């Protein structure tokens, strides 16, 4: 079994590292300028609030200054490094989940379509559905006292999204042999119900006092970075699976047709 798991982990690490690097560079080039604008607005808003609160000590407030622990250049470098590390961790988790789901049918059977389908489901479960309920907000936005509550709400949304995608897959498998429109309709309906359940969760406890254009740009880029992450991951993971299948000898067509999961 280890002879099968270890190569799968290697594929996950390679795909995660590549996806993390590409996503980190994407965020550095496109998302960071938007974040810089958001940070400037947040600092200006904080300074204005502090000046209004301590109007009687305006001179002292101006003199007080806290330097950043890391410069923006160091933060940009750290962003890319963090993205790569997160991608590697994601690769390990993905490989384990992939092994659990496909342990009965083999890890190299239909490697390319399975990689695409698995990553698409993961993107919907952990990024798209939770992001529709709780859209991303620029850094510094929100009350520090509600951080824990917001994290719990986001985690609950991710759990519901994952459970919804697992249910969709089970329905797709159990409807094997039925017409494809029925199977696809069941998956779509499950996704719609999952999204409806997400909107039963409490709303975001904090306002987002950011200009609409800046907020839209930030949210689109945040979702775009997640889409890019899973797209690159799927491409690398699937391509490596195809190469491994070719080296090991592709399964006979009859064997592939006999697989009921279709995922």
Image (spheres, rainbow, N blue to C red):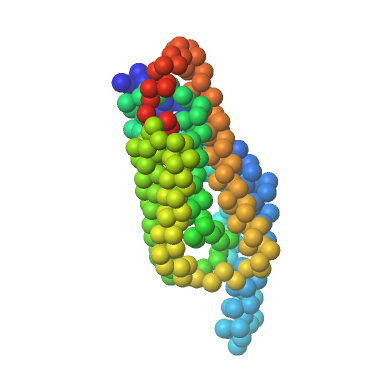
**Quadrant occupied by the N terminus:** top left
Query: Would residue 152 be seen by someone viewing this image from the given angle?
Result: yes
Image x and y of residue 246, in percent? 50, 14
Q: Residue furthest bottom?
A: 56
Residue located 42% across and 50% down the image: 190
Residue located 56% across and 31% down the image: 235
Image x and y of residue 174, in percent? 34, 37
Image x and y of residue 65, in percent? 60, 69
Residue located 60% across and 71% down the image: 209
The front one of 183 and 46 is: 183
- Hey, which quadrant is residue 89 in on the image? top left
The front one of 260 and 99 is: 260
177 on left or right of 22: left
Residue located 50% across and 60% down the image: 134
Image x and y of residue 25, in percent? 63, 41
Query: Would residue 73 be seen by someone viewing this image from the given angle?
Result: no
**Quadrant occupied by the C terminus:** top left
């Amino acid at each position: 079994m280890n002879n099968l798991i270890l190569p799968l982990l290697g594929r996950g690490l390679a795909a995660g590292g590549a996806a993390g690097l590409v996503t980190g560079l994407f965020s550095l080039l496109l998302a960071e300028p938007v974040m810089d604008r958001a940070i400037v607005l947040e600092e200006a808003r904080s300074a204005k609030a502090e000046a209004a609160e301590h109007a009687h000590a305006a001179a002292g407030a101006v003199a007080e200054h806290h330097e950043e622990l890391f410069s923006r250049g160091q933060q940009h470098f750290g962003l890319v490094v963090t993205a790569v590390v997160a991608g590697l961790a994601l690769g390990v988790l993905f490989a384990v989940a992939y092994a659990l789901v496909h342990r009965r049918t083999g890890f190299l059977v239909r490697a390319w379509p399975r990689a695409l389908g698995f990553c698409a489901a993961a993107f919907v479960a952990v990024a798209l559905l939770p992001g529709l309920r709780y859209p991303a907000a620029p850094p510094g936005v929100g009350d520090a006292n509600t951080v824990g509550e917001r994290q719990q709400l986001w985690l609950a949304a991710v759990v519901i999204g994952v459970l919804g995608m697992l249910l969709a897959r089970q329905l797709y498998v159990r409807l094997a042999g039925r017409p494809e429109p029925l199977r696809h309709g069941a998956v779509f309906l499950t996704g719609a119900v999952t999204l409806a359940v997400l909107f039963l969760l409490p709303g975001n406890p904090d306002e987002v006092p950011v200009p609409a254009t800046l907020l839209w740009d930030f949210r689109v880029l945040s979702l775009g970075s997640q889409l890019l992450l899973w797209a690159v991951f799927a491409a690398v993971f699937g391509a490596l699976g195809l190469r491994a299948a070719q080296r090991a000898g592709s399964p006979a067509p009859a064997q592939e047709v006999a697989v009921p999961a279709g995922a």
